[in-house]
Amino acid sequence: MDYRPQGVCSRHIHVDVDSNNVIHNVQFEGGCSGNTQGISRLVEGMDINEAITRMEGIKCGYKGTSCPDQLAKALKLYKSQTS
């Protein structure tokens, strides 16, 4: 799935979710390179629900959201579209 994040430095998130709801191939366009690479590697192979629980609500500085929070939103959207 492709997702356009809002309120963060990254401009685009791509994520694949397999038929067992396991996350693969997370790619961020823009944002803090080290942080987004770290997020991508940490969630690789993780269950979608676990990732949402761990990342939802994380804030970046004064912003009301963050790249991890936006990834959680993308995953929630994916779940709502495939249910």
Image (cartoon, helix red, strand yellow):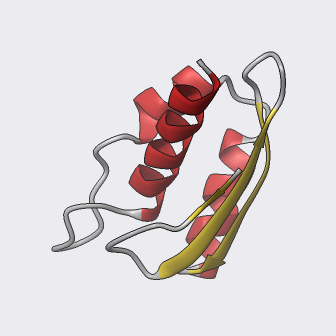
Nearest to the observer: residue 78 or residue 57: 78
Question: Quadrant of the image for the C terminus?
Answer: top right
**At 47% from the left edge and 33% from the top edge, which residue is drawn?**
52
Image coords of residue 29 (percent x, y): 66, 78
39 w.r.t. 75: above or below: below
Determine the image quadrant of residue 39: bottom right
Residue 30 falls left or right of residue 24: left
The image shows residue 3 at horizontal and vertical percentages of: 58, 60
Residue 17: x and y in percent read 76, 35
Residue ID at (21%, 71%): 63
Query: Which sits in the foreground, 22 or 6?
Result: 6
| Residue drawn at 59 percent across, 37 percent down | 78
Please tell me how many numbered marks the rendered image carries: 0
Q: Residue furthest left?
A: 62
Q: In which quarter of the image is residue 18?
A: top right
In the image, is residue 55 above or below residue 8? above
Residue 50, above or below 12: above
Q: Which residue is drawn at 62% across and 27% down?
A: 48
Left or right? Give the position of 13 relative to 70. Answer: right
Residue 22 drawn at (x, y percent): 76, 26
Q: Quadrant of residue 13?
A: bottom right
Q: Which of 42 and 15 is in front in this view?
A: 15
